[in-house]
Image (spheres, rainbow, N blue to C red):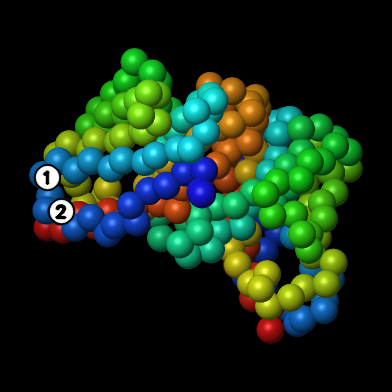
Amino acid sequence: DVKVTQSSRYLVKRTGEKVFLECVQDMDHENMFWYRQDPGLGLRLIYFSYDVKMKEKGDIPEGYSVSREKKERFSLILESASTNQTSMYLCASSVLAGDTDTQYFGPGTRLTVL
Amino acid sequence: RKEVEQDPGPFNVPEGATVAFNCTYSNSASQSFFWYRQDCRKEPKLLMSVYSSGNEDGRFTAQLNRASQYISLLIRDSKLSDSATYLCVVNNFNKFYFGSGTKLNVKP
C-alpha cells in the first residue's frame, strides 16, 4: 500500500512564525503536491514537484515556498504565518500524470494560526 | 469561474436509494477525470476514474460527457457506509482541479 505521511495532524502557530510542514511518501513517486482545503472552496493547489529540486507554482502560491531535496520528501514552508493561512493542508503523491494517474493523499495537517 | 463546479448538497437519501451527482468543468481541453471520496476529517481517496465510454464498479457508475463538459456519478442501492463527500476531479495538463464536493447522507 502506498503510504503518504505528514509530520503533524494538528499544529497551532502564532502570526509571524515560520512554519514547516513535512510530507514523506514511501512508493518512489515522482510527483508530489501540496494543497489546502477550506470549506466551500475545495482543494486548491499551492505547489507541486515532478522531480527532486524541481518545483512549480500552483494556483495559490503566495505566502508559501517548498523544498524537495530528496525524492520521498516534499516540504511546505510558511515564511511568516498569517491568520488567513489557517486551513487543512494536504500532501499528495502520484506516479504519472495522465489518464491513469492516481493521487494518494496524506492524512492532512490542520494548521491554526493565532 | 471555477474550474470544477459541484452542487454541495447535502443529498439525504434512505438506504437502498439510487442517487446521482453531477459535476461540470470549464476547460474543454481537460484530459482525465476522477471521482474521489472524502470521509469526515479524513483525506480524499480515489473512488474511480471516469472514462469517455463510461465505467462501472459494482454499485457505482461514472459517465463523462465531453460535449457538455460534465461528469456524473451514480450510486445504486445506497448503503449507510456510502455517507461521505464526493469530490469531482479534473486533470488539465498535469494539474489536478478539485470540486468543493457533494455531501451524501444515507439514512436508515
Quadrant of the image occupied by residue B77: top left
Q: Nearer the viewer, residue B82 or B91?
A: B91
In the rendered view, does B28 fall on the left or right side of B67? right
Query: At which x and y percent is residue A10?
Result: 62, 70
Query: At which x and y percent is residue A71?
Result: 81, 36
Q: Nearer the viewer, residue A34 or B100?
A: B100
Q: Same chain, marks 1 and 2?
A: yes
In the rendered view, does A26 fall on the left or right side of B39? right
Query: At which x and y percent is residue B107?
Result: 16, 58
Q: Is residue B98 above or below residue B94?
A: below
Residue type, mark 1 in image: Ala
In the rendered view, does A84 fall on the left or right side of A79? left
Question: Which class describes the residues within 10 Å of circle 2: few (<14), some (14-19), or many (20+)?
Answer: some
Q: Nearer the viewer, residue A61 or B35?
A: A61
Name the residue that disc number 2 marks. Answer: B13
Dot 1: chain letter: B
Residue type, mark 2 in image: Val
Quadrant of the rendering where the C terminus of chain B is positioned: bottom left
Find out whether the residues at labels 1 and 2 contact each other: C-beta distance under 8 Å: yes
Q: Residue furthest top?
A: B53
Dot 2: chain letter: B
Secondary structure beneath disc 2?
strand
Secondary structure beneath disc 1?
loop
Q: Residue at x 43, y 28 (%)?
A: B49
Q: Nearer the viewer, residue B42 or A83?
A: A83
Query: At which x and y percent is residue B29?
Result: 54, 25
Q: Residue at x 68, y 78 (%)?
A: A83
Q: Which mark is residue B99?
A: none
Question: Which class describes the residues within 10 Å of circle 1: few (<14), some (14-19), or many (20+)?
Answer: few
> Marks 1 and 2, how far apart in space?
6 Å
Name the residue that disc number 1 marks. Answer: B17
Q: Is residue B56 above or below residue B90?
A: above
